[in-house]
Amino acid sequence: MKASLDDLAVFGGPPAFAESLCVGRPNIGRREDFLARIGAMLDRRWLTNDGPYVREFERALERHLGGTHCIAVANATLGLGIVARALGLTGEVILPAFTFVATAHALKWPGIEPVFADVDPHTHNLDPEYAERLITSRTTGILGVHVWGRPCAVDELTELARRRGLTLLFDAGHAFGCSHGGRKIGNFGRAEVFSFHATKFVHSFEGGAIATNDADLAARLKRMRNFGFSGYDEVAELGINAKMSEAAAAMGLTSLESFDEIVKINKENHEIYCSGLGQVPGLRVVEYDPDECANYQYVVVEVETAAAGISRDALHKALWAEGVLARRYFYPGCHRMEPYRSLPRYRGVRLPMTDQLADRVLCLPTGSAVTPRDVELVCMLIEFCRAHGPELSIRLRDIVPAPVPAPHTY
Ligand code: T4K
């Protein structure tokens, strides 16, 4: 470990990790099973277009979620876009600004105006009261996001949508395997959309799935992900190409088979982070409700500068130099990103809770590529930086940030 500030990599010392630790390093699962599936796929010469692995993956997801219909898609962003279209969303849709920008883009792309609401600083999720204040005659829907896999205010939003005659859907990009009130996420609103991007704990390289309890909607979404085809030579409506490939579904199936194993690793890592950082002044590790199912795929800390004696950004800078590629998800809020920030309608948008949170959060590495010992070391590094916070912060001011390296270590 480091004995003095000069030992920190940011001041020229050796980095704590020769091989960087990433947030979102993919879990691989049982490689031989995946390769066997790929072999069978090649023998079959059926590579995409609603193939057998895609169907098998969808049935496996449905079993996990407790009966809802699942439609596999190429990624969650397209999934959200086709759901928005299928549900007839137009005009304005309210969503939190504290989310990955894909949530907003998925609306904006088909011409819907994302209307950004502030979040509850404790849950990091959409504040239903704030959302209600944004409803206008042009509002057609509310898009809640289960940030970090912690369910947003599902019951309040359901009631709000019912009372105001709005369509409710959820971006469940982080929330596969999580539950609310003992019911799996995927069973709420008109539809929920999961991401199975490579960085998610269960993944299909790129991919996603739409879950809905509405059989007619499911049938329509299935058509819409395939250009609107309802049969050979028959196009029933406007669709797009949002199909999942067989190779992706093979990865998804293999990944799903390691579900329990990966959640266990994530949970153990999360516990080590909690015990390593739980008592550190100014730091708060985001917790998961022990009475609900959680996937623990995100380890998130909030850094409160005054109490910690160091800012999130200073800590971030020091950790990166050590090979700990912590991420500032979701900084800045979507309202401060293009194209939104330059458009007249967003210029006056002030979301103090989102801004405050976006300045505090830091996601730390976890998953099967991160060992318990790695986590202990990361905690020690963070505690070291915090203990030397004021002096470290002053010295860091003179450090010109290195050009951000590509986050990959191939
Ligand atoms: N809604 C929400 C709430 C979301 O968070 C997301 C995506 C979406 C919707 C949209 O879902 P998709 O359309 O993607 O299905 C990453 C992911 O690309 C993105 O899927 C995810 N959320 C977001 C939170 O994180 P980036 O741009 O930060 O990823 P990137 O390339 O920096 O990778 C993250 C880390 O993972 C890096 O440190 C390197 C490592 N990595 C990444 C890949 C792809 C690897 O080690 N190997 C890999 O193959 O967005």
Image: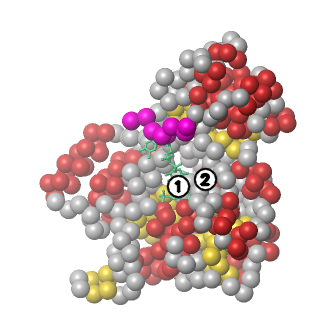
Q: Locate residue 108: give its quadrant.
A: bottom right
Helix, strand or loop for the magenta stretch, by majority = loop
Q: Which residues are magenta?
A: 403-410
The reply to whether the residue tagged 1 has its Cβ within 8 angstroms of ligand 1 is no
Residue placed most toward the observer, 121 or 362: 362
Q: Earlier in the sequence, mark 2 or mark 1?
A: 2
Q: Locate residue 58: give its quadrant.
A: bottom left
Residue 386 on image: x %, y %: 75, 27
Residue at 65% in and 79% down: 92
Residue at 66% in and 71% down: 343
- The label shown at residue 149 is 2
Disc 2 residue type (three-letter): Gly
Tell me if residue 335 comes above or below residue 324 in the rendering. below
Q: Does residue 133 appear to the left or right of 83 in the view shown?
A: right
The reply to whether the residue tagged 2 has its Cβ within 8 angstroms of ligand 1 is no
Q: Locate residue 45: give its quadrant.
A: bottom left
- Numbered label tally: 2
Disc 1 residue type (three-letter): Phe
- The label shown at residue 176 is 1
Tell me if residue 130 comes above or below residue 304 in the rendering. below
Residue 297 on image: x %, y %: 56, 44
Residue at 76% in and 75% down: 134
Q: Going by the picture, which residue comes out furthest to the left?
A: 43
Residue 138 on image: x %, y %: 68, 85
Tell me if residue 135 comes above or below residue 64 in the rendering. below
Tag 2 and tag 1, C-beta contact below 8 Å: yes
Q: Going by the picture, which residue comes out furthest to the top?
A: 3
Residue at 59% in and 17% down: 13
**Helix, strand or loop at mark 1:** loop
Is residue 408 magenta-colored? Answer: yes
Q: CA distance from mark 2 to mark 1?
A: 7 Å
